[in-house]
Image (cartoon, rainbow, N blue to C red):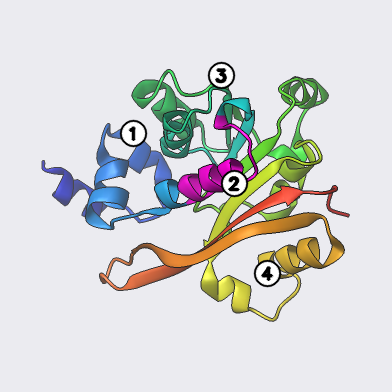
Amino acid sequence: MRIGDQWRRIRFHDYENLYAVPGLYEAVIYDILRCSSPATVCSMLAEAIGAAGERAGGLRVLDLGAGNGIVGAELVERGVDHVVGVDIIPEAARAAQRDRPDVYKDYLVADLSRLEAEDRRAMRLHRFNALTCVAALGFGDIPKEVFVEAYGLVQTGGWIAFNIKEDFLCDGDDSGFAGLIRSMIRSGAMDVRSEKRYVHRLGTDQSPIHYMAIIGRKRRDIE
């Protein structure tokens, strides 16, 4: 069966099955739906780091919602040599090990809001000074409580790189991610260095889906 036929038999957010077939996730998300987010967010991060007079090689990145390692691979391509992946889906970790075995220093399958003490200690030993979270916010994939926990694992002054569907930022409901991001900026927890509206990917009807990419620096933990 051709990949083009296989993906139509799988529900769009049925990640377990998308990850199970080598090459299927990339064919659906990147070849068919033309997702540009990993390259866009990682390029923006690299540019911000350069503008600050720093080197990508000095980053120790927590890649939240790491999936099968596409964002991690983009980071490594730009000179980052210490990336740790976290995802709640076991199939994602297996796919990352299968498809990109040399990208991650470690890969934790866990809900960060319910970490065992041993796992939390192990995560802190990485001394993260950057967080990436690409194409995983706002649809229920990663609850905001998990994002807050990941943010808390990053050292003060660390880089924060993420994206979110622009519709969520226009939402006046302060209980969701829009409210969280506004609160982070207003309270001074994060200093925004760059932001960009762009086409994240095409919908299944081929219409463009716009996201906002945001690069910032952590100034303090989120209350």
Looking at the image, residue 109 lies above or below residue 165: above
Q: In this view of the protein, which residue sits in the foreground, 85 or 48?
A: 48
Please give left or right for residue 89 compared with residue 149 in the image: left
Residue type beneath disc 3: Lys
User: Which residue lies under the disc numbered 4?
Assistant: 178
Circles 1 and 3 in contact, beta carbons < 8 Å: no
Q: Point out the tag, 2 or 1, that comes first from the N-terminus.
A: 1
Magenta stretch: helix, strand or loop mostly: helix
Residue 165 lies within the magenta run: no
Which residue is the extreme one toward the right? 223
Q: Position of residue 13 (x, y in %)?
A: 41, 53
Say which residue label 1 marks.
Answer: 20
Q: Residue furthest left?
A: 1
Q: Amino acid at mark 4?
A: Ala
Q: Earlier in the sequence, mark 2 or mark 4?
A: 2
The residue mark sitting in front, 2 or 4, is: 2
Give the residues in magenta: 41-56
